Image (spheres, rainbow, N blue to C red):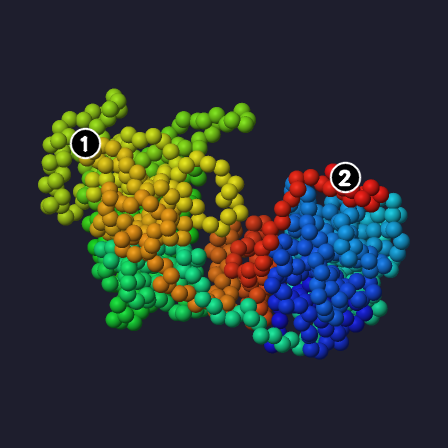
Amino acid sequence: MQGYYRFPTIHNDTIIFVCEDDLWIISTKGGVARRLTSSLGEISSPFLSPNGKEVAFISREEGHPEVYCMPTHGGVARRITFLGANSYVVGWSRDSKRILFASNVGQWYLRMFSIYSVDKNKDTPKLIPVGPAREISFGLKKDVIIGRNTADPARWKRYRGGTVGELWIDSAGKGNFKKLINLKGNLASPMWIDNRIYFISDHEGIGNIYSCTVSGKNVKRHTNHTTFYVRNANTDGKRIVYHAGGDIYVYDKQKNLSREINIQYHSPRVQTNRKFVEAAKYLEDYAIHPKGEMVCVTSRGKVFSMPNWEGPVSQNGKKSGARYRLGRWLYDNKRLIVVTDEKGEDTLQLYYTDNSKNPENLPFLNIGRPIEVEPSPRKPLIALTNHRSELILVNLKSRKSIILDKSKYNRISGITWSRDGEWIAYSFWNSERTSCIKLCNVARKKTYFITKAILQDFSPSFDPDGRFLYFLSNREFDPVYDSMQFDLGFPANIKPYLITLRKEMASPFRYTDIAPTGLELTGLDKLELSLDKIKKTIKRIRIDLDGIQDRVIPFPLAVGKYTQICGNKDKVLFVTWPIEGSSKHWFSEEIPAEGMFEYYDLKEQKKYTIIEGITDFKVSQDSEIIIYRAKNKLRIIKPVEKIDKRIPNQPVGHKSGWLDLSRVRIMVEPSLEWRQMYRDAWRLQRDHFWTKDMSGVNWTKVYKRYLPLLERIGTRGEFSDLIWEMQGELGTSHAYEWGGDYRKEPQYKQGFLGADLEYNRRYNAFRI
């Protein structure tokens, strides 16, 4: 068994490192590693004291990352700081009495760090006056070297931007700093050893350990890693310890030799144990049966189908090891189409919800990464959009696919079928700034623009009776003055519109104000009578394409922040959102649910509120049943006029309409899940990277390089570190990783007084 070893620190023959979010100790000669901590929170950046008796480190044992200290060979850890900020240990004072750490406490900019010292037995941290710094190392006297902007170069390899790591030196100890050296690389981990400065740099392509004189001359390279970066180097003044590729190495400067530490590692790896999680907590997607009898729920990469109120729950796919998504019911009411990466790439699978037949795997059709999937309501056809901005039609009978349309500018979205299955409507980007609504005739494989390019038209939806096509557009220009600065904005410029699909079809609206030119209404009563007759006889929707772009009619509704619109029988459903501040959503993992679900009655010519506090909604193919989401809850309603609007605290069941998602139990096997996530993250970069040649990086080779390290991962934090370093190979910005199912540590939130207090021993009082 091997672990994923990180953050080593050294003193003489003792090494302490982090694995599985805990501290471990081992001799520099290698052997069996012994666990020092069994913490509830993640531990990082340990640093052994100069006398070797204690180790300082950062722990989240009580929520915030704070400085802790404990005896080197084991014992009770003491919390030293109470800052409620981001901090990490960077060293000790020479007398082993004070711990040095970097922190962004009190900073308005979270990336601005300063160096502090604190007594190992607790006191008020003291600022070390060296200016902005993330790392520090002292010479033999008062001379000092600091790292500015220094981080972990392995997470953004070959970075050369404005915040590249730099080393600054005060060789006289008088507070006058100058830049140590100019190398075309990202520098980190400065270490003052005797009369030379050692550091990590990747100016020759791979992060290795180098050194130079205190004047920045005579640069020497000391390690020769060619596969993985040297990371988080640490020294006791004699030797340097670091990790690379999950292994720990010690560099002996006397011998000018680096060797790997042979670690015998034994652990139960409790954070890889199987567990069961709530479906509601990880709810991704949902779909309603064409007749409203069942639901399909996607949660944590697994697709489930079940009757609405009672009955067995079926998992459609393997128990673990693959991701399933975009589950949708087919027209026959018996099968589900599912997107899966079982074979390493996205493919389609068919499942029989009554388990009467085995699942069917469609051949690899090069469908890319599907974003939306919508089955035909009448035939074995699937329309899907993908990351390549394509609209693809898949024939489930012939097992073939064809590209119907492709945008050069952005993803196609909002695909919807006409009830007769002959037409597909969708939003299409025809320039970098404008999108229009297009129609595709499925039989002829021909596409047509049905709106003109103004700004963005989106969310098309067919009227169930084939009279209109509804859509949303932000084409309303009525700017609002900013209340804080002299500026104008458009916080609510979206409005619902409709297109009459036939030339003779008049507007359905009775305008109380003067009707727009060309929309004067005559014979509306006769129109309604003729529509009642059409409802009974219509089989195919007739669309008159000639002049259709001029038949766009606005709803007699105020502009707002509309997100969805959907045609219903003699009604139009839509969701509007309030104009509100965004800060409450910046760091929240909770799905917002401030939408107001409303409808416009075409017969009564009035707008009604269905319910407040929803996220989104979907309608069954027969337009009879509606399902909506409110945060992580699902509710089925029918009809909209008689819905009970009391959302909170209603029990699940058919009376309230709330679905009991606790019927779905999701088994998670972390190691298998991490393997799927690794492949998925790699594919996401491959499929979405800004240049096809991956900036000259052999991305397949990178995948194979880091893949073996998955066997050594024991926690979600270690997996995150692996993804960061793998993506760091691209050497590009905004290749990040965050979020995830981390082990929960205790959360004891810390309050702040709103003032800086300084204790004065002379007066035994605090100065504000």
- Classify mark 2: residues with Cα within 10 Å, few (<14), some (14-19) or many (20+): few
- Horizontal and vertical percent position of residue 301: 42, 61
Kindly indicate whether the residue at mark 1 contacts the one at mark 2 (C-beta within 8 angstroms): no
The residue type indicated by label 1 comes to Ala
**Quadrant of the drawing holding the C terminus:** top right
User: Is 304 located above or below residue 478 in the figure?
Assistant: below
Q: Is residue 257 left or right of residue 365?
A: right
Which sits in the foreground, 390 or 555? 555
In whole angstroms, how far apart are the C-alphas of marks 2 and 1? 78 Å
Question: First in sequence: mark 2 or mark 1?
Answer: 1
- Classify mark 1: residues with Cα within 10 Å, few (<14), some (14-19) or many (20+): some
Residue 635 in view, yes or no: yes
Residue 675 in view, yes or no: no
Q: Is residue 701 left or right of residue 612?
A: right
Q: Is residue 14 left or right of residue 680?
A: right
Q: Residue furthest top?
A: 514
Residue topped by disc 1: 506
User: Which image quarter: residue 514?
Assistant: top left
The residue shown at (82%, 41%) is 763
